[in-house]
């Protein structure tokens, strides 16, 4: 079930926005950048300014086109609030993240557009809740939005154990991808120069990619990212069937796919005892009542 239907025009806008956003992660590979001790303090606010209007435009476009209604918005708000409340339980300690399994399951049930919005809004809400607002936040929002989007694009015919296995595998891979993206946004500006893990301004793309692969493997892939992947996969396996059933039950009861129809008003009965006003009542007290057919004025009186 796709709660938030992505029209072709919206899909094109979403793809273009994603390509532009991905460029904010990877531009140092193609444009020489000077490593600094502060991580992207100049362009991160710009990304923040761009991301939020895109999300708002997506919601408003779907609202105006009838793609998302008040019930879907309410569901989006509830799940984003639950995710924001779940995140502090792990807070990334030793890679334990409690926010991504629900994002994967909700994206699976409600579709890619819903998953995209839920990922971005959940990370934004949790950052406000945990005082985690910083230059990293827009990049977290983008990475989580893509994670929810991908969950909604998985094959829809899978059910049962096969579905849980695919979702668990996707959650693990997405957790590693999220960690890689979050390393990518600050790596050129935080390691420093003259090390085997450092970004080299103007170096060939493959050389910098090799340096980054070594950096992310040493610093997070075998530690934090593995913890995140294991947590997400185990949570999907343990509570995934119950959560999927609950979300699908909520979707059926909300009847997101049911068209809104308005019944025509029933015609009022006319006749004695129906409560309809008579001719005298309509015309007023001074009106002369008319006789029914076949009575007075219908012809000469009968002969006796």
Image (cartoon, rainbow, N blue to C red):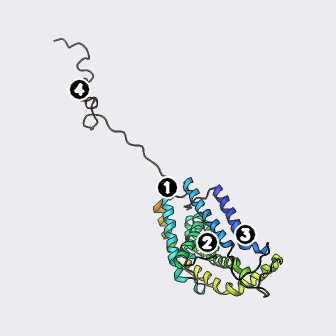
Q: Is residue 114 above or below residue 202?
A: above
**Kind of element beneath mark 3:** helix
Tell me which label, 3 or 2, sits earlier in the chain. 3
**Kind of element beneath mark 1:** loop
Q: Which residue position holds label 2?
A: 141
**Of 136 and 43, the residue lying toward us:** 43
Residue 292 in which image quadrant: top left
Percent across and percent down for residue 68 are: 54, 58
Percent across and percent down for residue 299 are: 25, 14
**Of 231 and 62, the residue lying toward us:** 62
**Of 198 and 44, the residue lying toward us:** 44
Q: Which residue position holds label 1?
A: 258
Gap between marks 3 and 2 measured at Cα: 15 Å
Locate the N terminus by quadrant: bottom right
Of tags 1 and 2, the one toward the viewer is 2
Q: Which residue position holds label 4?
A: 286
**Kind of element beneath mark 4:** loop
Crowd class of label 4 (few under 14; some 14 to 19; many from 20; radius 10 Å): few
On the question of residue 154 being in view, the answer is no
Crowd class of label 3 (few under 14; some 14 to 19; many from 20; radius 10 Å): few
Percent across and percent down for residue 170 are: 63, 74
Q: Which residue position holds label 3?
A: 23
On the question of residue 232 being in view, the answer is yes
Of tags 4 and 1, the one toward the viewer is 4
Q: Is residue 104 above or below residue 12?
A: below
Q: Looking at the image, which residue is at 47% across and 65% down? A: 250
Q: Is residue 34 above or below residue 194?
A: above
Gap between marks 4 and 3 measured at Cα: 84 Å
Q: Most extreme residue toward the top, as rendered?
A: 303
Crowd class of label 1 (few under 14; some 14 to 19; many from 20; radius 10 Å): few
Residue 149 in which image quadrant: bottom right
Tell me which label, 4 or 1, sits earlier in the chain. 1
């Amino acid at each position: 079930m796709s709660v938030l239907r992505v029209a072709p025009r919206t899909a094109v806008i979403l793809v273009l926005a994603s390509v532009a956003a991905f460029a904010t992660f990877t531009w140092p590979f193609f444009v020489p950048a000077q490593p600094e001790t502060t991580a992207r303090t100049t362009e991160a606010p710009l990304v923040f300014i761009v991301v939020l209007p895109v999300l708002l435009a997506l919601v408003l476009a779907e609202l105006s086109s009838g793609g998302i209604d008040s019930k879907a918005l309410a569901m989006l708000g509830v799940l984003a609030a639950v995710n924001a409340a779940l995140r502090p339980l792990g807070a990334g300690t030793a890679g334990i993240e409690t926010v991504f399994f629900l994002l994967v399951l909700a994206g699976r049930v409600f579709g890619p557009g819903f998953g995209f919005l839920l990922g971005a809004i959940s990370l934004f809400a949790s950052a406000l809740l945990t005082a985690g607002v910083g230059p990293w936040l827009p990049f977290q929002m983008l990475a989580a939005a893509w994670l929810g989007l991908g969950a909604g694009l998985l094959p829809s015919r899978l059910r049962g154990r096969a579905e849980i296995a695919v979702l668990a595998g996707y959650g693990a891979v997405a957790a590693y991808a999220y960690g890689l993206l979050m390393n990518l946004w600050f790596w050129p500006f935080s390691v420093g120069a003259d090390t085997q893990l450092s970004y080299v301004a103007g170096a060939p793309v493959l050389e910098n990619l090799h340096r980054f692969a070594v950096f992310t493997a040493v610093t997070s892939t075998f530690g934090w990212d593995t913890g995140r992947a294991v947590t997400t996969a185990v949570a999907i396996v343990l509570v995934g069937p119950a959560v999927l059933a609950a979300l699908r039950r909520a979707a059926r009861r909300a009847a997101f796919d049911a068209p809104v129809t308005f019944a025509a008003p029933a015609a009022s009965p006319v006749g004695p005892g129906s409560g309809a006003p008579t001719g005298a009542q309509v015309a007023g007290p001074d009106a002369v009542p008319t006789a029914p057919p076949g009575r007075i004025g219908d012809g000469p009186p009968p002969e006796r």
